[in-house]
Image: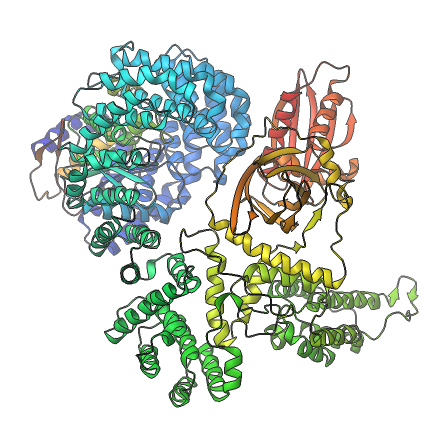
Amino acid sequence: MIKAILIFNNHGKPRLIRFYQYFAEDMQQQIIRETFHLVSKRDDNVCNFLEGIYFTLIYRHYATLYFVFCVDSSESELGILDLIQVFVETLDKCFENVCELDLIFHMDKVHYILQEVVMGGMVLETNMNEIVAQVELQNRMEKSEGGLSGAPARAVSAVKNMNLPEIPRNINIGDINIKVPSLSPF
Amino acid sequence: MSDVVEKTLSALPGLFDSQTGAARITSRLRQLVKSITELTSKNEEESLIKQELSSMKEQVSSPNTSMMREIMVRAMYCEMLGYDASFTYIHAIKLAQQGGVLEKRVGYLAVSLFLNEGHELLLLLVNTVLKDLQSTNVIEAYMALTVVAQVFPKDMIPAVLPLLEDKLSYPKEIIRRKAVLALYKFYLIAPNQVQHIHAKFRKALCDRDPGVMTSSLHIYLQLITESPDDYKDLTGSFVTILKQVVGGKLPVDFNYHNVPAPWLQIQLLRILSLLGKEDRSTSELMYEVLDESLRRAEMNHNITYAILYECVKAIYTIHPKAELLEKAARCIGNFVLSPKINLRYLGLKALTYVVQHDAKLALQHQMTIIECLDHTDFTIKRETLELLFRITNAQNVTVIVEKMLDFLHGCSDEHTIIHLVGKVAELAEKFAPDNSWFIQTMNDVFSTGGDLLQQDVPNNFLRLLAEGSESKEEDDQLRLYAVNSYLTVLKGDASHLPQRFLQVMSWVLGEYAHLQESVDQREVIRLLTQLLDQRSVSSETRVWILSALTKISEGQTDLILDLAESLSSSQDTVLRQQAQELRQLSQDSQLYEWVLPRGAPWDSMEVDSSLSFLDGFVSEALAAGAAPYKPPHQRQEELCEDRALNLEPYSFSLPVSLSSCSITDRQSPTLLSVSSGLSGNSTELSQKAGSSTLILEGVKRVWGRDGYLRQNETTAPPVDEPSAAVQPSGQQEAAERLEPQPEPSTQNQDKLQLASSLFVGLGAGSSMSLLGKSEAPPPRFRKKPRPHESSSSSSSGTSERSSDSSSRSSHSTTDSFLYGSLLEEEPATSISAFSHTPKSSTANGLAQNKDTKEDRRANTSQILGGDMVIVRPNTFQDKHPSLVSSDLTALLPADLKDLPHSDVISLTSDPSLSLSSCRLFRDEALLLVILISNCTETVIKDVAVQLTCEELETASLRGNVMNCLEGNSTSVCHYALLMDEPHTNVSFTGTVSYQTQPGHTNTLSFSGTLSAADFIRPLVVSTEEYGKLWLSLSHDVKQNLKLLTDASDPLRTTLNALKDALQLHVVDIIGSEGIVACRLLSGAPCLLHCRVNGAALAMWLRSPHPALPDCILYHCQRALAQH
């Protein structure tokens, strides 16, 4: 079973946190901190598995983001590793070149996508096309009702006004292309 | 930058379209994110979020739903960062309740993120979920299912269950799939509630949509993990499915990188390996498909390796087949040799798994393993060490331990250190080639592991040193080496050493420094004293050091007096006390000799932990009017009662004598607490104290309803009461103490036995023993292997002794230690198969004394039994109990014969012993009677039964050890078991150790299960009482049960069936309704309200205990299903 899914950036700022097993609030924060501590120490050329204190950590590092799946012994390591890939590819498809900003401003959307992949700690769907289809179905419903969907996009526009220290770069990792602007003080 | 601009442009139309309100909201979120971006410190972030939260609090009651949605997102953001936004929880629920589809979606998401299954607010969501599940809008049902699978209150499952079952046949595939997962979730949190729908799980497995089938595999993986035997019949189906998947029969949609449904394959392989484990015929069904999987999975992608890995694991788990094993071994080779680091890791993991079956495989990959050992990746290194640990033997231990220690030195992760250090210590103890290596390694372990070390590592080490092996010479050499090594360490800089290490060192020096004759004892004392002065040394360690000093201080009066002097002004009272004792001892050599006899053999020492030598003092003090000793927990209780009493007004004026009595009663017992802790009469006395409270009530009744009541003569002056009652018993006690072979009171006897079983072999000969000196048992502990289960008690005994013999200051520990144990042990009742007469446990003194000694010996062997490797694991299954001839029930002790009892079932047997068990239902406990029959003609000696069950509490046991069991006779041992927390089924395990010939101990293990039904007792109440009780109970569960319709009065028949199965009490049956009551032993009641509802029986259960109704419901369902 998947116990938790953590996404944080290179500085340890959480971007998406989803626990499937109950932990008290401060315990959750501690797990995030410790996981970041463990994962961030590792080079990119070492293996993607780690024995944590509470569970096995399976992670992938994409440019500025770490995607960490905390699982128990009943999950296949390589299987989960590819599931992360599927999830990120799906994000990429839904956001068209996903970047860290998308995760910040569309936190709810990312959660919806995740819900299609993993439900209550169990893998629900691994087929990317299916996932995208489900998400789009719901997006259509959203468009028909109008409302919030536009809001985060406008927030992205606001970020344009922020002083971005570096120009976003394109980085090739694995099979997909994630373009990620690096925002230093996050 | 261009990307951001692009995004902005694409977002622009949205900006223009939206209403002005939305734009304002957006600016909020934008501002929040923006300002957080600009912050530089955690403090600033905190104050900003606080500000944000308070502004959210103001807006939160806004009726504008789109605003609410945005607030929810902001709240999620704050919660993610670790700030508390709990005030929004209720609004999240409201949003899900009231809003349109969009609001619902945000609301449900927020709820599933914010709340956990136990959260009380979740109950408010139940109605919404129910409504949405019934909604015709697919999206709403879809969302409701999602939230049900993520978070749903356990108690409300029955309400939603029928709706979910309907959803299993919903036309849309995704809905069915989610319903299956939701049911799985229910199974995880409340297995009892969904057990009736197993047939539906099977239907889901055969669903026409492969997606639904995939989801149902989650359930089957879990079910099969729990009980593989129940699902063997499905093996064929799983094999067929896997064959079809591997053969590419699924739609192309399910392919991932051209591999057909890899996750499905992984899941199926896991299920198959569980099914085929230790089962030849089942394994044979799957050889072909495993072979095909191996063959097909050759494409070079990550996910195919995942399948291969599962395949290999499955092949090694199921019944072996040479051809497949060969292929799997080759496959592991590919993993291990792969340049891809992830695959290499998995290769190592597979090797670690496989090495138990086939150690040769590791040899093939020696070089790779060595390479991995020097790998830069921490995870790889750790896994390699894990592998090495598995293949360690006496030849390679030095190298492997060296590697492990090297790794430890460079490691900073606490978790890993604790984990590995324990392993190093284990290996060192198991395979140490020689003394110097062993001590050196343990030194490394202690200094590296430091204070993170698990307590059992130093304890085991000290035990090993203290108990030694068969040869005294070897032991002394080991000890001598340890002493030398520690002296060297202490001569260097000791300030950085961990406390645990210092404690070990000081204990060893204290015990064995005298073995080293070439070193002046004064030097040792000087080194230890130096340690005492160091600031880094903790006060606990100081106590250890001082104990050591006490032991080696003989004849060094001048040094010791200096030391005692310097410590007498210490801040630490324990140290001050020890120093004072040290001074006394060093001045009185006779006393010293008596307290700390030099060179007394370890095993012959005894602690009179009942402190009976103080009885005279106690009775004197009691006679002088002191309050009797009460154990701390009792004092605590009384304190609480006192407090409760104090709330009442002092309306009654009590006679002076009475109040003075209560004052003595409450007097601080510290005066006596240390000394009289366990003297046999203290419990009696506290009962006496209780009787004086009764008198107090009697006096209250001086004024009755009818006016003044003439005082009875029987109310004697209360103050005299306790002392008068005590005096004779006290004198008797004192007299007993003088006799060489005294007859202790029954209570004393019990406690002595308890003490002897707890401290057996560890006592100190310093204190007087009631039982006289028993012959010193031969050294019984072998050096290897180390038993882990007995280490805790004996290790605490070790430390006990070290402080006890030196200072006798830690009696309170002894007290708590003894009081902590609830075991009430009684002498063995050995019954000859022919006479059927149990030997009375209250036989005359002498016989009893003999019994006790025998018991003690038997107890030793019981601990020894833990030393042995379990010879014959044997499981007995509840479902197929093998009935033993019922005349065994005739062997039950006379006082138990009348109790209702179950059939006698056989537990286990071997050529010499056969064990069977019988359950006897006493009101307040379940008596588990174990009948031990000697099947041989010869006498079997030292039979000891040990029974463990985590969930149950043993209230008392009797006859678990016996000195000898005559040929062809049967002995009875029984355990009174209590169930505090309801569990549907609990399993127990146990071992019997016995000796057919001296020195040769056999062990026979057994196990079994008890069901909650064994612990349920009828609760006899009247209908009115039932009504009152019903209203006062909080936890309720409702469920429909099967009604036995074949009889003329279905309700009565059903209730009677339940009554027979579960010992329920049918209170009343009125028309189509029936009320039934029961309780868990003498604890929590459970009331059942049954109503005939068509063809079903609607059962409504209420209990003060949340888990009890579930439990009873489960057994009711079973009982009816079996009927």
Asked if residue B960 is positioned above or below residue A118 in the image, the reply reads: below
Q: Residue at x 25, y 45 (%)?
A: B385
The quarter of the picture where residue B558 lies is bottom left
The quarter of the picture where residue B902 lies is top right
Q: How is the image coloured?
A: rainbow
Asked if residue B541 is positioned above or below residue A103 in the image, the reply reads: below
- Percent of width and height locating residue B51: 31, 50
B731 vs B641, nearest the viewer: B731
Note whether residue B477 is visible: yes
Q: Residue at x 65, y 55 (%)?
A: B824
- Percent of width and height locating residue A64: 16, 39
Where the C terminus of chain B falls, by quadrant? top right
Asked if residue B565 is positioned above or below residue B14 in the image, the reply reads: below
Q: Residue at x 54, y 72 (%)?
A: B765
The number of numbered badges drawn on the structure is 0
- Percent of width and height locating residue B1038: 61, 28
Horizontal arrangement in the rendering, residue B585 relative to residue B641 (left or right): left
Where the N terminus of chain B falls, by quadrant? top left
Q: Residue at x 51, y 87 (%)?
A: B588
Note whether residue B84 is visible: no
B449 vs A150, nearest the viewer: B449
The quarter of the picture where residue B891 lies is top right
Asked if residue A109 is positioned above or below residue B627 in the image, the reply reads: above
- Percent of width and height locating residue A73: 34, 35
